[in-house]
Image (cartoon, rainbow, N blue to C red):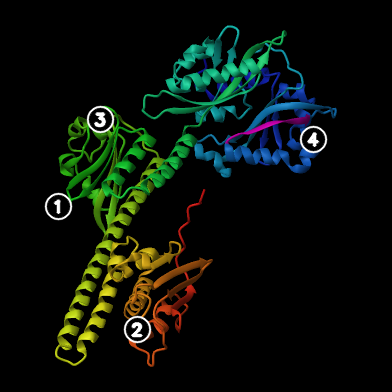
Amino acid sequence: MILNNDPSQIAAFNELILRSIVDHAVVTMDAAGIITSWNEGAERILGWTEDEIVGKNADVFFTDEDTVEGRAQTEMRLAIKNGRAEDVRWHVRKDGQRFWGSGLMMPLLAATDVSGDAVQDVNRITGFVKIFRDRTEERTTNQRMELLQDRAHLAMQRSGTVGVYDIDLQNDMIVADHVCARMHQVNVELAESGTSVSEFYKGIIEQDRLIAMNAVDAAIVKGQAVDVAYRILSTDTRPIWVQSQGSIQKDENGSPSRLVGIVVDVTDQRQHLNMQEARLEFADKVRDIMDPIQIAELVCEVIGHTMYVSRVGHGYIKDDGNTLVVEADWNQMGSQTLVGHHKFSDFGSYVDILHSGKSVIMTDVTQDDRVDRPERLAALGVQSLINFPLMQHGKLKAVLFVNHASPREWTNSEITFLGAMFDRAYAAIDRLKLEAERNDLADEIAHRMKNILTMAQIVVRQSLRGVDGAEAAAHTIKARLQAMSAAQDVLTLSEEKGADIISVVGTTLAPHLPNPSRIVVNGPSLPLDSSQVIGLSLALHELATNAAKYGALSNEDGHIEIDWEIDNHSFKFCWQEFDGPAVEQPSSRGFGSTILQRTVGSYFDGTSELSFKPDGVTFLIQGEARGKPAPQPKSD
């Protein structure tokens, strides 16, 4: 029977098919769960006639336990959220007898253009369809099932997203409706009259074909339901994603005889998932990239693989406002690279739109008035395109472009995805630029600081020339300035503009150690900020200078132990001298003692103490560790 597009004829035909389904219950409900229609299969399985049941709540055929738990409402919520809700549990007949029912519930959508996201919109759901069968005992049937839908199936068919099929497993033949046929690129008349199953497998892309076939084989061998997703070849490079679900029916001998099921176009949902995964992939990989062009190459590659396009590229706009310098692009096999210089005026007048901050989207460049020379775009393999502008201070800065070799309808989700990826790419590029600018500024400041310290040494030396006792004073001041300069070197070499305490101790003490074995250093790695580096460097310089003049480093036997420890956020640093000359308390406090007693501890948000014990000088810092110690390797 071939149908025309007359709605009344289609509705009558659907009603005839619906009434012919006697071994599956097909129940429709409104959005509140009130039953609106009931087929003969439902009457046979459950016992109520349609007149008895219409208008009652669907809870009537759920068990008391499931009714208390609100199982019917839970299924409706899951159907809205996921597009379907599986239902395998005990149900109740009119006479109170329980049976094991297996099926699923799906939302019914309004008869409008439906995208995958429409299922999420409760305002566009008119009700639900519940399809199930009695699995307590396998029913034998030879009746073909053209549709598994209720009276709302017409709306579903018009959406072009749901189709049905019936496979004769013994003869390897399939009968399918026009929706299922068109999804699989099969002639509709051939599918409705019956054809070989292999005709439907031909439309599945090679990588997924075996997956689909194995799912059917497993269902036959194990008697389980079919639930498999696969991609269909299309005239566009974008594949069609199909979800197929069905159940095995057995003959009187208990052998699998038929596979009856539905197919759903889930392309939008899959594309949405792919875009989410692409964002995560880009975020994960971009962390390790330190070159702006490599970031551009990565974003082009991720977009290209996700959107199934011919080319994705990125370029910046020169000062003339008309020249695009393409620094990176990704090309599908066979497409030429566009890296280089290109003038917008060679192709059309749409550059003014980009300068206004608006995207340029073309479905077919040969039919777009904004393109003056479509043959030039065709020579580059471009028949549809998107140009996405990046504005900075009201001026066009860069363009992300997507090209396709054939006409293409660009979706809103694709446009949104491009914008999000462009933003992420430039956030990463700007981060690199800011880090580079920060490092350049820090290097410049460090250079100027060293120049200032050098000039200070010169000024001190010239000022004290000819003054009695000035040579010793000049030497002391010069040594302190050199210690500050060495600390600045440590900071400059550090990427974080702080430094680890181990590096600070080693660099500061190096000029004072003709024999390094005389100083024992023990403590964990700990990052210090710039002020702590300067403070600790000055303290170590003062201590080492005094030890060389009067303390443990002034004889042949003395030595020094330096220890520090971190307990949670508490920091303790200790300098202790041994086996040096006997120590006497100084009669007055010099500048060095002032630094050690009053200043250094404040850098660590704590205190510092200098002690002149007879057996050796001791210096102690007690405060807080601002950084976290690095983890120590475990010993075997």
Under circle 4, the secondary element is loop
Give, as a three-letter code, the residue at label 4.
Thr
Under circle 2, the secondary element is helix
Q: Mark 2 against mark 3, which lies toward the viewer?
A: 2
Q: Mark 3 or mark 2, which is nearer the start of the sequence?
A: 3
Q: Is there CB contact under 8 Å for labels 4 and 2?
A: no
- Give the residue displayed 19% in from the left and 46% down from the top: 324
Relative side of 32 to 271, left or right: right
How many C-alpha atoms fall within 10 Å of the one at disc 2: few (<14), some, or many (≥20)? some
Under circle 1, the secondary element is loop
How many C-alpha atoms fall within 10 Å of the one at disc 3: few (<14), some, or many (≥20)? some
Relative side of 369 to 538, left or right: left
- Give the residue displayed 65% in from the left and 39% down from the top: 76
Q: Is there CB contact under 8 Å for labels 3 and 1?
A: no
Relative side of 580 to 210, left or right: left
The region drawn magenta spans: 83-91
- Give the residue displayed 21% in from the left and 32% down from the top: 380
